[in-house]
Image (spheres, rainbow, N blue to C red):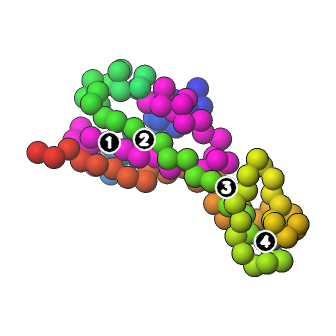
């Protein structure tokens, strides 16, 4: 359910930006941070269901790029990658300053070559 509304949002954004040319889009790429609560498989399923219902988008492809969580350590003044939801820097300092991982956006749109 959640994923389907995301897919609908994506298409309304595309329709707004590309107007009639939406049908010329061959492929879209979505970047989803690990904290954005988006499951790539579920979003792919929702996308497939959507394009089956909307004939004009039948040929469109989707790629979901998953982005790691990156937090910032105040002690070392550097960014570190968060693995297994462990928000602790290698120096031992915990951090809740998220630099990357919350995002969900359309990162690439490829138009059909004609
Ligand atoms: Zn540190």
Q: CA distance from mark 2 to mark 4?
A: 32 Å
Answer yes or no: is residue 88 visible: yes
Proximity of marks 2 and 1: CB atoms separated by less than 8 Å: yes
66 vs 6: above or below = below
Q: Residue at x 78, y 71 (%)?
A: 73
Q: Is residue 80 left or right of residue 12?
A: right
Per the rendered image, the range of residues in magenta is 18-47
* Residue receiving disc 1: 27
Q: Is residue 77 left or right of residue 69?
A: right
- Image quarter where the C terminus lies is top left
* Residue receiving disc 4: 73
Badge 1, how many Cα within 10 Å: few under 14, some, many 20+? Answer: some
* Residue receiving disc 2: 63
Q: Position of residue 27 (x, y in %)?
A: 32, 42
49 vs 64: above or below = above
Residue 69's label in the rendered image is: 3
């Amino acid at each position: 359910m959640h994923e389907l509304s995301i897919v609908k949002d994506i298409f309304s954004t595309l329709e707004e930006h590309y107007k009639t040319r939406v049908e010329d889009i061959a492929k879209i790429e979505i970047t989803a941070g690990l904290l954005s609560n988006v499951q790539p498989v579920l979003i792919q399923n929702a996308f497939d269901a959507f394009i089956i219902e909307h004939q004009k988008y039948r040929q469109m492809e989707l790629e979901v790029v998953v982005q790691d969580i990156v937090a910032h350590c105040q002690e070392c003044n550097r960014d570190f990658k968060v693995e297994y939801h462990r928000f602790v820097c290698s120096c031992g300092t915990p951090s809740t300053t998220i630099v990357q991982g919350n995002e969900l956006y359309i990162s690439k749109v490829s138009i059909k070559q004609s």
